[in-house]
Image: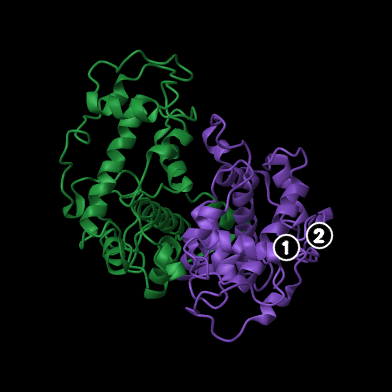
Chain colours: A green, B purple
Amino acid sequence: MSYGGYGGGYGTPPPSGGYGAPPASGGYGAHPPSGGYGATPPSYGAQRGPGGFNAPPPAGPPPGADPQLWNWFAAVDADRSGSISVFELEKALVNGDWTPFDLDTVKLLMSIFDTDRSGTITFNEFAGLWKYIKDWQNVFRHFDRDRSGSVDSGELQEALRQFGFNLSPPLLALVEKKYDVFKATGVAGPGQREPGISFDRFVRCCVVIKQLSESFQRLDTDRDGWIQINYDQFMSTVLSLP
Amino acid sequence: MSYGGYGGGYGTPPPSGGYGAPPASGGYGAHPPSGGYGATPPSYGAQRGPGGFNAPPPAGPPPGADPQLWNWFAAVDADRSGSISVFELEKALVNGDWTPFDLDTVKLLMSIFDTDRSGTITFNEFAGLWKYIKDWQNVFRHFDRDRSGSVDSGELQEALRQFGFNLSPPLLALVEKKYDVFKATGVAGPGQREPGISFDRFVRCCVVIKQLSESFQRLDTDRDGWIQINYDQFMSTVLSLP
């Protein structure tokens, strides 16, 4: 699936990194993860046994597990069930300004990493989720040029442009209004939320724009920039968005 | 603007109540508000003076104000600024199971009732917001037939059908997956969130489906159930949703 350059011409080659799917950590000048967390090799996924649905709580980390990653998993797994529910994840994830992730972003993450559709995240699935968040943090930090902890209008535009989405100014304004709480309201909260787009909404924004653009491109079989779509297709395209 | 019966034929007359816009409180067998709160006459809106942007904090309620409504307004206005920010509103709104409203639902409410686009809700705007929530609560209670505090699959289907949206079973499944946190995850949180669709997500769900259906209908000028749409129209339609 390609998703290059809508608005910038259909023939544009797709960017080298895959965003929406876990972003390439080396893309767009982002730094590689500085700590050992994100450096976990992808072998966790291979170590999973069959099943894992309602497995008894593990007594300890699986062999070869990153101890730090295991500790964080155990901390998030508040009820010690051996896996993480959407509610445990919701409580664990915070933005740089300590505001919680939107439930829809938590659901987005669950939908990507709950690969066995058990409704919970096992330790092996958690390793992928952890890396995904670390990679997005690097992307976010890269585009948050003024280190404000949030992405402003110009930074968002540059991010989307580098991802291959050359949105028109009115579309960019709509994106900002949707994902930046302050753009919609015009006032700053007293020490509660930073102006600009928070980390979790930035991730959701990028995934939504990528998914929408890909949906449009799939439907635009003759590549003329127009699609014909019926009510059911239209509704299902939109209702499938995170 | 009409929004009748997509999937059930374009010629279907629109339902008698206007949903998405403040729902008609008497519609669909919903009971009238039992307390005095919702009974506030709509004259508040007419009492507004010109301006109101950054007005000094009022010393007390405007003449004729419902004292109970004023008290609630004052409680939500935590910083005593005389108007309510999106963050103050976010802290004040909870579902029946005490979970907070999603930020996107709070933004939706702000966008409807911040009529002077000041970024905050004045007392007069608050009166409209209060009535809107009360009306939606009545609608929600009407469709929550088993009084579980949330709307399940069958209840949602019946609500959408009565609103004039006869969605196909696959679309209904998508709607549920999007707005019911449990449908997406399959597990119940320990005493945190009820299974089914919470009040605030039910409101957002109904407003989104209404807005999408209206957008489609506006574009379907020849009423054949198909629209032709370019990338910018497609993106702006979706990004304008709450």
Q: Check residue A5 in the rendering and tell me which mark sits there, or answer none.
A: none
- Residue beneath disc 2: B27
* Quarter of the image where one finds residue A129: top left
In this rendering, position of residue A189 left or right of residue B80: left
From the top left corner, tell me how far across and down residue A162 is, in percent: 25, 61
Residue B213 in sight: no
- Residue beneath disc 1: B23
How many numbered callouts?
2
Image quarter hosting the C terminus of chain B: bottom right
Residue A227 in sight: yes
Q: As rendered, which of A8 and A69 lies closer to the eye?
A: A69
Residue at the right extreme of this rendering:
B29
From the top left corner, tell me how far across and down residue B18 is, in percent: 73, 66
Q: As rendered, which of B106 and A106 lies closer to the eye?
A: B106
Q: As rendered, which of B108 and A215 lies closer to the eye?
A: B108
**How busy is the neighbourhood of tag 1: few (under 14 within 10 Å), some, or many (20 plus)?**
some
Look at 69% across and 81% down and name the residue there.
B46
Asked if the residues shown at circle 1 and circle 2 are in contact, with their CB atoms under 8 angstroms apart, the answer is yes
From the top left corner, tell me how far across and down residue A127 is, in percent: 30, 31
* Quarter of the image where one finds residue A167: bottom left
A14 vs A93: above or below: below
**Mark 2: which amino acid?**
Gly
Callouts 1 and 2 on one subunit: yes
Look at 63% across and 69% down and name the residue there.
B220
A12 vs B117: above or below: above
**Mark 1: which amino acid?**
Pro
**How busy is the neighbourhood of tag 2: few (under 14 within 10 Å), some, or many (20 plus)?**
many
From the top left corner, tell me how far across and down residue A147 is, in percent: 21, 59
* Quarter of the image where one finds residue A202: bottom left
Element marked by disc 2: helix
Look at 47% across and 42% down and name the residue there.
A107
Label 2 resides on the chain identified as B
